[in-house]
Image (tube, rainbow, N blue to C red):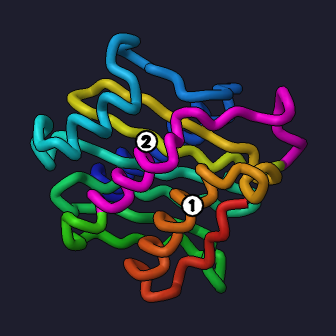
Amino acid sequence: MSVTREKRILCLVITLLLAMEGCRDVTPAQNPAMTMEQQLNAFLEGEIAPEAFQLSYQVGDDFSGATALECFGNGNYHLESSVTTERQLAHFDGQVAANEIVSIAQAMVDHKIWNVRHGRPLPGDGEAVPTITIMVDGKATKVDCWGGEVVSTPQFAAVQDLILGLIKRISGGQILEVGR
C-alpha cells in the first residue's frame, strides 16, 4: 500500500469515526465564529480561493460499504467507495468543472442545510449517517442526517441527491451509493 493510499484510508476511517461520534447538527469544529452559512457564502462570493474550499461527503461503514468524496472549489476531487457491484474498493481522482462544486454549494445555501435537525436523538443500530462537511483553511463545519430521515428532510435530501449524482458521474456508474 502506498503512503498516499494509507493516508487516505486513515482519513476516511477518522472521518467515519467522527461522524459516528454522535454529532447531531451543524457543528463548527474549530472556529465557532465561522458558521457553515458564512463559509458557503464567502466561497460563493469569491472571498475564498477555490482551492481553499473543500466539500466532503461520507456515508457508510466497513460492513455495509462506505463512500467518501472530497472535492475542492476548483473541481479537483478524490472519490473512493466499496459500494460497488463486486464490493471492491474503487478509487477515482480527477477534476470536474468548478461550476459543479459551486452548484452544490449554492444548493446548500438555497436549502439552508445548516438548519437540518434530527427527529430522533440517535440513529438506529446500523443506520447510515450521511455527513456533509465544509472545510475552509482547516476550519470545518458539518451536517449529518440519519439515513432513515433523509426522505423526510428535504433540504438534506436535495443536496445529497446532487452529490450522489456527481459520484455516479465521476465513477461512470460503478459506485452504487444511495446514501441511506
Q: Secondary structure at mark 2?
A: helix
Which residue is identified by label 2? 11
Which of pointers 2 and 1 indicates the residue nearer the eye? Answer: 1
Task: Kindly identify the residue that appears in the image at 49 percent across and 56 percent down.
Answer: 68
Q: Is residue 151 above or below residue 87?
A: above
What amino acid type is highlighted by mark number 2?
A: Cys
Q: Is residue 152 above or below residue 23?
A: below
Apparent side of residue 69 relative to residue 40 in the rendered image (left or right):
right
Task: Kindly identify the residue that appears in the image at 70 percent across and 26 percent down.
Answer: 22
Which residue is identified by label 1? 158
Which label's residue is closer to the chain start, 2 or 1? 2
Q: Secondary structure at mark 1?
A: helix
The answer to whether residue 10 is visible is no
The stretch in magenta equals: 101-126
What amino acid type is highlighted by mark number 1?
A: Ala
As for residue 65 lying within the magenta part, the answer is: no
**Residue 32 falls in which quadrant of the image?**
top left
Quarter of the picture containing the C terminus is bottom right
Horizontal and vertical percent position of residue 85: 65, 85
